[in-house]
Amino acid sequence: MFHLLFKFFGVQHSSAELGNFRPANPLFDPMRFEGQAIVDEVLVPGRQWWIYFRGTWWNAISVEPFAFSPKERVYVVGRIGNTLIIAPLNFVPVT
């Protein structure tokens, strides 16, 4: 299955390199967890949420306490395991 995905998206890697691969196509990068999401439910006010991101629901936390409400758009800035880290939509990452 993976070989078909690699062939379809133009990734040229051997199976020995699959442990640490980055696809050549930036539009299909499953390792990248950034972008807009929608808050579905507040689990712990100011600390933990259930969000909808890239077609599925995720547990989410934020580094600082924010008052996100259901149906509010947020920005995913990263992840820790199966938990996404979110920030307000007007978040500007420091480079």
Image (cartoon, rainbow, N blue to C red):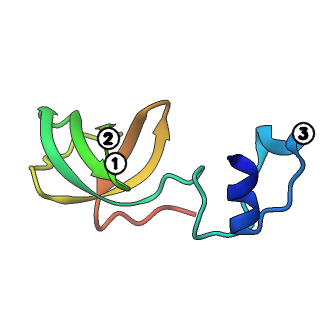
Q: Circle 3 is placed at which residue position?
A: 16
* Residue 22 seen: no
Check contact, mark 1 vs mark 3: CB within 8 A.
Answer: no
Classed neighbour count for the residue bearing mark 3: other residues with Cα under 10 Å, few (<14), some (14–19), many (≥20) = few
Q: Which mark is residue 27?
A: none
Identified by mark 2, the residue type is Ser
x then y, percent, for residue 5 = 68, 57
Q: Circle 1 is placed at which residue position?
A: 86
Q: Which mark is residue 62?
A: 2
For the residue labelled by badge 1, is the local secondary structure a helix, a strand or a loop?
A: strand
Identified by mark 3, the residue type is Ala
For the residue labelled by badge 3, is the local secondary structure a helix, a strand or a loop?
A: helix
x then y, percent, for residue 70 = 9, 50
Q: Is residue 50 left or right of residue 5?
A: left
Decide which of 93, 51 is in the foreground and name it: 51
Classed neighbour count for the residue bearing mark 2: other residues with Cα under 10 Å, few (<14), some (14–19), many (≥20) = some
